[in-house]
Image (tube, rainbow, N blue to C red):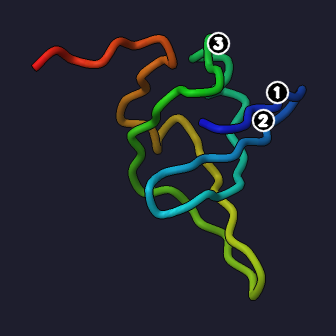
Amino acid sequence: LKRYVAADVDAAISLVDPTGEIEGSLHKQVSVTYPDLSIGTVFILRNVAVFSTTTSKFLNITLENIIKIFPADTPYPQL
């Protein structure tokens, strides 16, 4: 999670991974269920709706899309 702007309805977010960055929205119920979301949180997602136009792409993430969330302060596993 690179950007997180909470709102009365869905939160505006930016996600980043090795392939690039994408804007999106996080359904309000996700923010209610996971109130400690912050920059650096890692999501493992499935079956996310991607809205695509000729100039951009946009994710719409709901609780059903989330497999696992790792809070930003989760330590790296020891090898």
- Who is closer to the viewer here, 26 or 22? 22
Hey, which quadrant is residue 50 in on the image? bottom right
Which three-letter amino acid code belongs to the residue tagged 1? Ala
Which three-letter amino acid code belongs to the residue tagged 3? Pro
Q: Please rate how many residues cluster around mark 1, counting C-alpha atoms within 10 Å: few if below 14, some from 14 to 19, many from 20.
A: some
Q: Secondary structure at mark 2?
A: strand
Q: CA distance from mark 2 to mark 1?
A: 4 Å
Q: Please rate how many residues cluster around mark 2, counting C-alpha atoms within 10 Å: few if below 14, some from 14 to 19, many from 20.
A: some
Where residue 49 sits in the image (x, y, percent)? 56, 61
Name the quadrant of the N terminus: top right
Point out the tag, 2 or 1, that comes first from the N-terminus: 1
Residue tagged by mark 3?
Answer: 35
**Residue that lies at the very extreme toward the front in this rendered image:** 79
Q: CA distance from mark 1 to mark 3?
A: 10 Å
Q: On screen, 12 above or below 59?
A: above
Q: On screen, 51 above or below 55?
A: above
Residue tagged by mark 2?
Answer: 11
Labels 2 & 1 near each other (Cβ < 8 A): yes
Name the quadrant of the C terminus: top left
Which label was assigned to residue 6? 1
Where residue 35 sits in the image (x, y, percent)? 64, 12
Point out the tag, 2 or 3, that comes first from the N-terminus: 2
Looking at the image, which residue is at 45% across and 36% down? 43
Looking at the image, which residue is at 53% across and 26% down? 41
Labels 2 & 3 near each other (Cβ < 8 A): no
- Who is closer to the viewer here, 73 or 32? 73
Looking at the image, which residue is at 55% across and 61% down? 20
**Residue that lies at the very extreme toward the right in this rendered image:** 8
Q: Is residue 39 left or right of residue 8?
A: left
Point out the tag, 1 or 3, that comes first from the N-terminus: 1
Q: Secondary structure at mark 1?
A: loop
- Who is closer to the viewer here, 18 or 27? 18
